[in-house]
Amino acid sequence: MHFYRSLSPIKALTFDLDDTLYDNAPFLEKAIDKMMDALRQVDGLQQIKLVEFNQVKQDLLIDKPEIYHDVLTWRAESIRRFLHLKGINKQQQINQITDQAMDTFVFWRNKVVVPKQSLATLAALAEKFPLAVITNGNADITKIGLTPYFKFALRGGANGPSKPFPDLFNLAADKLALPSENILHVGDNLHADVQGAINSGMQACWINVLGTDIYHQSEATVLPHIEIKQLSELNSLL
């Protein structure tokens, strides 16, 4: 654990999910593959490529920049636009295909396996502190087995603009009924998690899973209070 700033007394912790409590990439990749497989079951879409869908998704972001706050809405709207571009114009059919593809995506998206070491750390911390989730992602703590550890979860889009905007951090502080300066937010993203937490008045812990030098990171516009390389280092707070 490396300290960059002095810490105020910690009375609660909030956590990012993806790439903070588990390696997100394999689970997200599988969910996307399964979603594409579901779309390929539709007549005329058997040969579609992920690169085509991703281009539509990025074009939608250009047209509707605010849509990125809710990644589930962004994905669903991207599917609808993709289907329309592929010549499917009946709204009922578009809605049905979109719902099926999104159900498939969400099902596999929540097949996350959280490492035992992460669960052990959360269990120990939850004995001493109230814990909560602040995520920009779409994993559901109920479906991935994390509800025993957290008081609540806030998600970008569903509960307000995504990190680093202050809304989710401020809402978490309100729900915890604590001053922001007594809450430590833990996350892997220097922009969304560290900058977002500090700008909202919280303390920030950067989990540096890749072991990079923070002074060589373009996203490091502010320094966190502490840096860790493994979640278990938080046990030193007990």
Image (tube, rainbow, N blue to C red):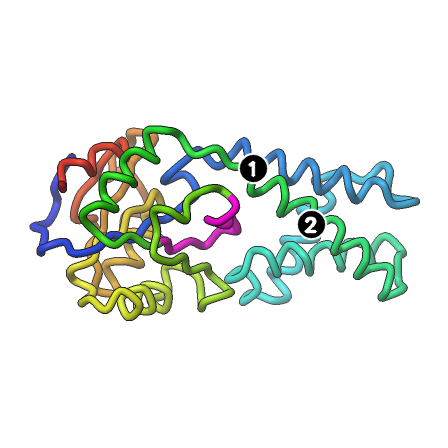
Q: Residue at x 34, y 56 (%)?
A: 151
Q: Which mark is residue 52?
A: none
Residue 12 image position (x, y, % from top left): 21, 55
Pick out the residue farthest to the right. 43
Task: Give the camera-side residue of 124 and 76.
Answer: 124
The answer to whether residue 178 is left or right of residue 171 is left
What is the three-letter code of the residue carrying label 2? Asp
What is the three-letter code of the residue carrying label 1? Lys
Q: Which mark is residue 111?
A: 1
Name the secondary structure under disc 1.
loop
Q: Quadrant of residue 171?
A: bottom left
Task: Give the camera-side residue of 58 and 81.
Answer: 81
Q: Residue at x 32, y 47 (%)?
A: 190
Residue 217 can be seen, yes or no: yes
Residue 215 image position (x, y, % from top left): 23, 39
Along the polypeptide, which appears first: circle 2 or circle 1?
Answer: 2
The answer to whether residue 198 is left or right of residue 157 is left
Q: Residue at x 29, y 29 (%)?
A: 211
Task: Give the camera-side residue of 112 and 197.
Answer: 112
- In which quadrant will I find the C terminus? top left
Q: Is residue 232 above or below residue 39?
A: above
Q: Bounds of the magenta span?
A: 133-143
- In which quadrant will I find the N terminus? top left
The answer to whether residue 30 is left or right of residue 182 is right
Which SS does the magenta portion mostly show? loop
Residue 226 image position (x, y, % from top left): 17, 43
Dot 2 corresponds to which residue?
Answer: 103
